[in-house]
Amino acid sequence: MHHIAILTSIAVLAGALGSQSLKGQTLRDVAGDRLRIGAALMARDLDNPRYADLLATQLNCVTPENELKGDATQPAPGRFSFERADKIVDFAQRHQMKVIGHTLLWHQQSPRWLFETPDGKPLPREIALANLRERITTMLTHYRGKIAGWDVVNEALSDSPNEYLRDTPARRAIGDDYIIQAFRIAQEADPDVELYYNDYNIELPYKHAKAMRLLRELKDAGVRVDAVGVQGHWQLGSPSVKEIDDSIKAFASLDIRVMITELDVDVLPRQRSGADLSATEEGANPYVNGLPADVAEKQAERYRAIFDMLGKHIREGTITRVTFWGLTDGQSWLNGFPVRGRTNHPLLWDRDYQPKPAFDAALESLRSTMTK
Ligand code: XIL
């Protein structure tokens, strides 16, 4: 009797494992301690146990998708709200996952009063700096020891060919040194936390030189930048793997680490690359009833090529984190950007939480990187 019971459980277990991709191996298993592999999530996603299970099984790192942004954390002058972000941090701690803070300073999803008067004029520099200091110091103090690293400044570089820095409320109030100031304040507030500069399209030639210039200027000013975050909102056909590879090598030459911080592979037609939230478009919506097998295969090969290229940088210690911007296709922000109301399929798991061909490709590639 006893033996039969054991044999039966072994058979059931083997069957269960066999039905999963690559015998149930997870990205988290394969990454081990050498790579942070993460996803962005919203606090409300955690109310769904299937979502929470998949997240904790597959990944070792999370980024709150909106909960740490200015508008979420500073509802009114002098008031901070941490509840929704704390829920994510508690979950991460229970599952031994790292947390990444996104973001301390960004021109989007940020309260106007931080850097502007009620009638939209820039605040005097000293007042704007005091507001920036209050924000950064309060956030870093609350999350000391709980958040491993922060996107101190997000998307400060301009998309226009003749302009270096983006025109933002913080820059208008404080001046061109506002990025240096933000890093300096952060470093003083918590000398142990990692500090990142994060942006989109900085792997593309039109913006890469500006990112190199900014990182050099920060270095010359004596502030610490631990890593540059390449967002990685990519498409099936662009950017080329070589462009990404070249930009990582160039960043590494500045003695700085590189993280892919918001990876997704858009499969829908769009006009502009990157993630400029103010640039919305019209566009077709061809895959409402599911991703056709040939497109799913193309996407898998794209993920494989990206992970194969990252492999060398992971082994050399240049790439220390890869974070997907969401877990399943149903939750992806690309269902609403740059065209509202489409059905997109940019991630490794589909709307039913099932692994896609892209998952197998990423897992196989990462496994071969980690066993080399
Ligand atoms: C996006 C979120 O995913 C959406 O839920 C929100 O409505 C808008 O912002 N670059 C970033 C992220 O740095 O903060 C953005 O996240 C996506 C582009």
Image (cartoon, rainbow, N blue to C red):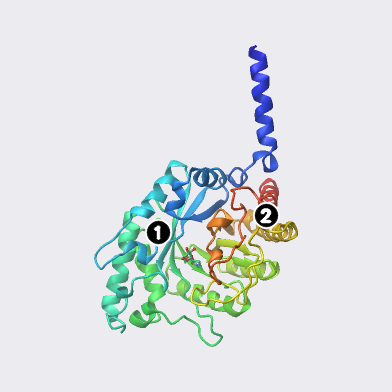
Is residue 230 among what the camera can see?
A: no
Task: Give how far across and how far down residue 151 sits, in percent.
Answer: 45, 64
For label 1, the SS is loop
Chain-order first, disc 1 or disc 2:
1
**Rendered residue at 27%/78% (across/down):** 126
**Rendered residue at 55%/42% (across/down):** 57
Task: Give how far across and how far down residue 16 sits, in percent.
Answer: 66, 34
- Looking at the rendered structure, the kind of residue marked 1 is Glu
In the picture as drawn, the residue positioned furthest to the bottom comes out as: 162
Q: How many marks?
A: 2
Give the quarter of the figure containing the N terminus: top right
The residue where tag 2 is placed is 358
In the picture as drawn, the residue positioned furthest to the left comes out as: 78
**Rendered residue at 27%/80% (across/down):** 118
For label 2, the SS is helix
Nearer to me, 251 or 294: 294
Residue 14 left/right relative to 109 = right
Is label 1 in contact with label 2 (beta carbons under 8 Å)?
no
Residue 183 left/right relative to 2 = left
- Looking at the rendered structure, the kind of residue marked 2 is Ala
Q: Point out which mark residue 67 bears.
A: 1
Nearer to me, 189 or 77: 77
In which image quadrant can residue 161 be found?
bottom right
